[in-house]
């Protein structure tokens, strides 16, 4: 690098620092303060880092780490106290997270690409350029760089930027400005903010609610009266205090409703309630919401760490906290003091002074007033304006300089009084007066909305205007009359609407909700302990369980002892009948087992074919991939078609069409059509093809095929825990079930044509003689059909000499499966496979062996219910049953019972929509506040966040033991209280977190995220209890109608 | 005032079940891979803040259920998407074949204003596994036929290319959004192009 280039580079580095400094300074002006995580701060640090790493004598200093400037900092810490301070902080921060190396300032000049990767990964961890950042926040950066510049010779090459007499001093002086700024952690409106995770929401809730409500669960059940806006004073008061407290907690964070305009800690205030004279330090903040500006002051005791020891005392601090609405304030008195930073006293409309706010030194009072003035705009303003106090005389000063007297450096302390003028309301009132045919002269000093709450603004503003008019004008009788009339009207209309709402409410209850719960209330007296082993011993007499009612009741109110679940669940699910004898159940089990095994052998046969097909597809794909890689872009068209997986349909189409053209025989098209419907046509390798050609002439018999088939099943059965080979050959039932009978007859004729066993079925697993038999099994019987085969050969042989079509049977008794059947089942198999592998792998029960059991149950169900098919989530429903029973056939039987109800929840049923609609009605009745919130977010009403809850009966929301409890209560509830108990569980979940949901005004996405994060962390017993209470509440409500 | 609105970009991940949608999302957002994920039921999303062209944006990444039967439920999730990520498994040819239907499905359900220009990104996941069934070339050809959508070969397990892929996703989503903002917002957010160019000449001194 020539020296010219190097100078250019240095100039560039300095220019970039200059630019970033400018950016930060601008930001500090426009935003009053700079956020620590602001992008401009990061950029500035980056620019500084680049300057510092340039020409650094790494080798000489022994700095080999990627973060050499951090190492440099630690090195100079010995000599420079400023560096020592920052170095200490860096080490502290890094030690907080022991996993992290000091990658905070990476070596940007030598490894740019690496740094790019790192920077993205570090976004959520320690910030980049940690030490530079800290030095900047600690206002030490310029001094540290000063030190480096003066001692440059020791650390830098001669031609380094820092060592350069000009650039070095420019660098350090550039940073003086940014080092004088205040950096804040408070997130501002124009800085993005992320939705806090569920943990943090819970934590915040805990902080804010701890003083009045111990656990969130204790919250009383929402009262339906609330929907009529007549909530009891007691509850609303509680809510208010709680919300007040919550607001303070929330105000530490930026939130969507209020913008934080100003925040300063260690502002001294003497709280009126504290009964002490010493001012307390606290956090002063200015918030702008849609309605008004609010000033809040929170004692430091509340802000800083809620340690355990503080808890008893903490509550009193909530009383000290101050909240002032700016529209209640008329005057702002400012007292300057050379010693301290200044004092602001707010004087309300009533003339009462709010406690003085003492700002620390450093222009904070001015900054506060500045923010205040900005915040008041456009509806209000400070009078006189802060920025152009003397603008009348000197117009050119306008908006350029603050009040000279407010600048601290002034020797002489001065006091100032500002009046807050509300311009918009003022006009509104004038308008109102006009409307009332009044010509009175309203003084401009009127301030509207005195003490009026934001909720009922219209009426209160009106009443306020009466007072105004009384004081202002003598001839106000007419006006009063008019206002009284309007008030009367309002009162009457309000009463009417209240009554109307109540009627609607009751009609909703009657029309929508009466079906959700049972009419008769079954008392839970003496049932709280559930079905314990002692109770079981009482009820289960000589192997007969007859008192169904008692079992349901006990289960509903207290659950089933874990050891008993295996015995009780089949009863609850309806598999065992109450009153059945042990022998009857034994017989049932035996039958269940036999049926299960029969079904299993059926689908195992199909599975074998599917697997074979998969293998070939895979092989094709790989072959294609390799041919593609060798032959470049030229891909034989035929192979491409093979890969499209539509091969099967394509071929049969070809077959059919070509034959229609070729033959004049009238029978042919008909027969061929059957072929198309009922056969499986395979892609095989060319060896197989030639083999088929060779064997075409060989006659063979069906028994031989059977033989071969049995072998196939045998081998495929390896996974089965209870192999049932003998059943395999006898189960022809399935074949006939699938095919129409006439088809079958036709098919028999065709069998020789269409059936060619593909010898490649798990070739490695098959003994040689089986392979031979299979090859022999490939045969043709009829002349006409051999023509078909030839056609097959033609369609394939022509286009791809390397491929061939094989037609394969793989069923007992030479059963043949239709293409559709194979494809459908194959698709299901793949899905089941994928989901079973992923099902609860972290739960101890699901070892490979048990996952196979799960898979067997799932496949058996799907085979028996191919019209329904496998849908994601079914595995989750089988899993808990299997864990309890550890028996495939019993699990299968119970799962079938379970699915009778659950299947409607899956996409082709309509239960989910019903659930959502019911949820909506229930929330409307039982928690109107929540309903309002949901109503205000349109999408919210879709209740998608409940989707998984209902689909899986909360299985994914809870840990296994809780799933068991939930499920048995749901089943028992069907008989005891409600067939829609899941709705009440969902409602209970919402209620438990309602305060968090409401206070954060969560929308559709927020709530989905919240509940997804809360999965498996709910307090199951509390949810169950609340759900039961909700059912009872609704029952009572309906009973009393 | 130089206020910048919070930029939220909605990204939808689609693809057959088991191609690794959840894993990709978690690898990107949480920097970890787990073989413990279950089949996604319903929908979930994660958010992550990223810096794109000197702007901080929040990516809201929606993970969906892979079984197509559940997609009819997805309308609410698809709405307002800024970018759609299609994922397939390079070892499973079927997952590649369904890409067309996923893309069509998305365009129908989300019905973006300019379907032809809507940003898609294709990810071929599980490149750490053998044997490969879909070659890079084939995937690229597909992408070319679909208006040159960007293609990345990723491994959620090995964190291969995941960062780069999502960076591109964020960029495309941002372009999409700023275009639609221009149409409807009187005061579109500024994108400072000058900053980026200066930065680059400064020898990688910036954070992004």
Image (cartoon, coloured by chain):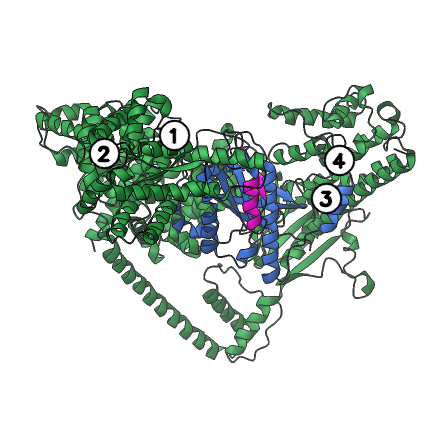
Chain colours: A green, B blue
Marks 2 & 4, CB-CB < 8 Å contact? no
Give the side of residue B74 with respect to residue A16, left or right.
Answer: left
Q: Nearer the viewer, mark 4 or mark 3?
A: 4
Q: Dot 2 corresponds to which residue?
A: A814
Disc 4 to disc 1, how far (Cα)? 56 Å
| Disc with the residue nearer the chain's start (2 vs 1) | 2
| Disc with the residue nearer the chain's start (4 vs 3) | 4
| Displayed quadrant of residue A600 | top left
Disc 4 to disc 3, how far (Cα)? 20 Å
Nearest to the observer: residue A35 or residue A602: A602
Span of residues in magenta: B137-157
Q: Dot 3 corresponds to which residue?
A: A341
Give the side of residue A1029 with respect to residue A539, left or right.
Answer: right
Q: Which mark is residue A837?
A: 1
Residue A812 lies within the magenta run: no
Disc 2 to disc 3, how far (Cα)? 98 Å
Disc 2 to disc 4, how far (Cα)? 87 Å
| Disc with the residue nearer the chain's start (3 vs 1) | 3
Q: Which mark is residue A139?
A: 4
Marks 3 & 1, CB-CB < 8 Å contact? no
Q: Decide: few, some or many residues near mark 3? Use Cα within 10 Å; few <14, some 14-19, many ≥20.
A: some
For label 2, the SS is helix
């Amino acid at each position: 690098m020539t020296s010219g280039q190097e100078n250019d580079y240095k100039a560039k580095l300095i220019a970039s620092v200059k630019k970033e400094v400018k950016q930060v300074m601008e930001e500090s002006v426009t935003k009053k303060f700079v956020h620590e995580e602001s992008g401009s701060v990061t950029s500035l640090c980056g620019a500084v880092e680049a300057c510092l790493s340039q020409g650094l004598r790494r080798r000489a200093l022994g700095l080999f780490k990627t973060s050499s400037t951090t190492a440099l900092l630690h090195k100079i810490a010995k000599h420079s106290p400023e560096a020592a301070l920052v170095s200490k902080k860096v080490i502290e921060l890094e030690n907080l997270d022991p996993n992290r190396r000091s990658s905070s300032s990476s070596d940007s000049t030598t490894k740019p690409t690496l740094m790019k990767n790192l920077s993205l990964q570090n976004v959520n961890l320690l910030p980049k350029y940690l030490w530079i950042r800290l030095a900047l926040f600690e206002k030490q950066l310029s001094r540290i760089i000063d030190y480096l510049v003066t001692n440059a010779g020791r650390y830098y090459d001669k031609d380094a930027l820092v060592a350069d007499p000009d650039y070095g001093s420019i660098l350090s002086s550039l940073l003086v400005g940014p080092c004088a700024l205040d950096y804040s952690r408070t997130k501002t409106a124009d800085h993005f903010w992320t939705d806090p995770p569920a943990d943090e929401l819970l934590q915040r809730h805990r902080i804010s609610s701890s003083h009045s409500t111990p656990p969130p669960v204790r919250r009383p059940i929402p009262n339906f009266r609330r929907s009529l806006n007549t909530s009891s004073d007691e509850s609303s008061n509680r809510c208010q205090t709680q919300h007040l407290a919550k607001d303070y907690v929330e105000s530490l964070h930026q939130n969507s409703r209020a913008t934080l305009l100003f925040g300063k800690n260690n502002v001294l205030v003497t709280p009126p309630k504290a009964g002490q004279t010493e001012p307390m330090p606290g956090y002063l903040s200015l918030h702008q919401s849609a309605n008004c500006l609010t000033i809040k002051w929170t004692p430091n005791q509340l802000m800083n760490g809620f340690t355990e020891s503080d808890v008893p005392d903490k509550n009193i601090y909530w009383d000290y906290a101050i909240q002032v609405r700016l529209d209640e304030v008329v005057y702002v008195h400012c007292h300057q003091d050379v010693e301290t930073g200044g004092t602001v006293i707010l004087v309300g409309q009533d003339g009462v002074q709010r406690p003085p706010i003492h700002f620390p030194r450093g222009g904070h009072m001015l900054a506060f007033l500045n923010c205040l003035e900005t915040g008041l705009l456009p509806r209000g303003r400070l009078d006189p304006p802060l920025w152009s106090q003397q603008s009348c005389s000197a117009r050119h000063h306008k908006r350029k300089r603050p009040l000279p007297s407010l600048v601290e450096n002034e020797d002489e302390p001065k006091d100032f009084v500002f009046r807050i003028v509300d311009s918009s309301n003022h006009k509104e009132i004038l308008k109102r007066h006009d409307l009332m045919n009044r010509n009175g002269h309203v003084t401009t000093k009127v301030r509207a909305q005195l003490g009026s709450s934001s909720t009922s603004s219209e009426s209160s503003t009106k009443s306020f205007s009466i007072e105004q008019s009384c004081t202002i004008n003598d001839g106000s009788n007419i006006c009063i009359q008019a206002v009284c009339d309007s008030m009367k009207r309002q009162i009457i209309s309000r009463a009417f609407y209240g009554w109307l709402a109540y009627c609607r409410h009751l009609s909703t209850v009657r029309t929508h909700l009466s079906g959700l719960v049972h009419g008769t209330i079954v008392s839970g007296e003496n049932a709280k302990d559930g079905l314990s082993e002692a109770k079981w011993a009482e009820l289960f007499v000589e192997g007969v369980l007859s008192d169904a009612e008692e079992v349901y009741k006990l289960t509903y109110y207290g659950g089933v002892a874990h050891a008993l679940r295996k015995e009780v669940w089949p009863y609850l699910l309806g598999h065992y009948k109450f009153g059945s004898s042990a022998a009857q159940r034994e017989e049932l089990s035996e039958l269940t087992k036999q049926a299960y095994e029969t079904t299993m052998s059926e689908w195992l046969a199909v599975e074998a074919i599917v697997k074979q097909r998969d293998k070939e597809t895979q092989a094709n794909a790989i072959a294609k991939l390799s041919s593609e890689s060798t032959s470049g872009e030229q891909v034989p068209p035929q192979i491409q078609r093979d890969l499209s997986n539509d091969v099967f349909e394509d071929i049969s189409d070809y077959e059919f069409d070509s034959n229609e053209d070729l033959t004049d025989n009238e029978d042919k098209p008909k027969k061929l059509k059957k072929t198309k419907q009922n056969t499986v046509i395979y892609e095989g390798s060319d060896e197989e093809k030639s083999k088929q050609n060779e064997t075409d002439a060989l006659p063979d018999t069906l028994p031989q095929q059977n033989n071969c088939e049995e072998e196939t099943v045998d081998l495929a059965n390896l996974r089965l825990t209870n192999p049932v080979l003998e059943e395999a050959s006898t189960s022809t039932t399935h074949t006939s079930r699938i095919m129409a009978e006439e088809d079958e007859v036709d098919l028999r004729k065709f069998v020789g044509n269409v059936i060619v066993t593909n010898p490649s079925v798990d070739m490695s697993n098959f003994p040689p003689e089986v392979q031979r038999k299979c090859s022999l099994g490939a045969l043709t019987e009829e002349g006409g059909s051999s023509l078909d085969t030839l056609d097959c050969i033609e369609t394939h042989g022509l286009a791809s000499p390397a491929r061939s079509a094989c037609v394969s049977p793989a069923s007992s008794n030479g059963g043949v499966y239709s293409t559709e059947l194979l494809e459908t089942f194959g698709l299901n198999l793949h899905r089941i496979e994928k989901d079973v592998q992923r099902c609860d792998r972290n739960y101890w029960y699901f070892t490979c062996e048990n996952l196979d059991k799960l898979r067997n149950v799932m496949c058996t169900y799907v085979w028996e219910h191919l019209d329904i098919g496998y849908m994601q989530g079914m595995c989750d429903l089988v899993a808990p049953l299997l864990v309890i029973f550890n028996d495939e056939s019993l699990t299968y039987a119970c799962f079938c019972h379970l699915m009778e109800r659950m299947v409607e929840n899956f996409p082709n049923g309509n239960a989910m929509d019903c659930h959502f609609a019911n949820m909506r009605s229930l929330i409307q009745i039982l928690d109107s506040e929540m309903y309002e919130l949901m109503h205000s977010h349109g999408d919210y009403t879709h209740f998608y966040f409940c989707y998984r809850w209902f689909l899986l009966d909360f299985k994914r929301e809870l840990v296994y033991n809780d799933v068991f409890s939930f499920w048995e209560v749901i089943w028992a509830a069907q008989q005891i209280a409600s067939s829609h108990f899941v709705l009440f569980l969902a409602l209970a979940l919402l209620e438990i977190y309602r305060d968090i949901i409401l206070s954060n005004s969560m929308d559709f996405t927020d709530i989905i995220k919240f509940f997804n994060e809360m999965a498996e962390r709910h307090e199951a017993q509390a949810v169950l209890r609340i759900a039961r209470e909700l059912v009872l509440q609704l029952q009572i409500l309906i009973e009393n109608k | 005032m130089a206020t910048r609105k919070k930029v939220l970009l909605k990204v939808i991940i689609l693809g057959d079940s088991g191609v690794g949608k959840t894993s990709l999302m978690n690898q990107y957002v949480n920097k970890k891979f787990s073989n413990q994920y279950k089949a996604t039921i319903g929908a979930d999303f994660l958010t992550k803040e990223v810096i794109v062209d000197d702007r901080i944006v929040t990516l809201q990444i929606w993970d969906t259920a892979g079984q197509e039967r559940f997609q009819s439920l997805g309308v609410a999730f698809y709405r307002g998407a800024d970018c759609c990520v299609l994922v397939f498994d390079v070892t499973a040819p079927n997952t590649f074949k369904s890409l067309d239907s996923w893309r069509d499905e998305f365009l129908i359900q989300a019905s973006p204003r300019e379907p032809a220009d809507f940003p898609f990104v294709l990810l071929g996941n599980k490149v750490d596994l053998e044997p490969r069934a879909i070659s890079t070339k084939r995937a690229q050809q597909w992408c070319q036929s679909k208006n040159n959508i960007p293609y990345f070969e990723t491994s959620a397990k090995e964190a291969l290319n995941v960062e780069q892929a999502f960076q591109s996703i964020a960029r495309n989503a941002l372009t999409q959004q700023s275009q639609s903002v221009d149409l409807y917002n009187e005061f579109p957010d500024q994108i400072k192009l000058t900053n980026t160019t200066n930065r680059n000449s400064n020898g990688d001194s910036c954070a992004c």
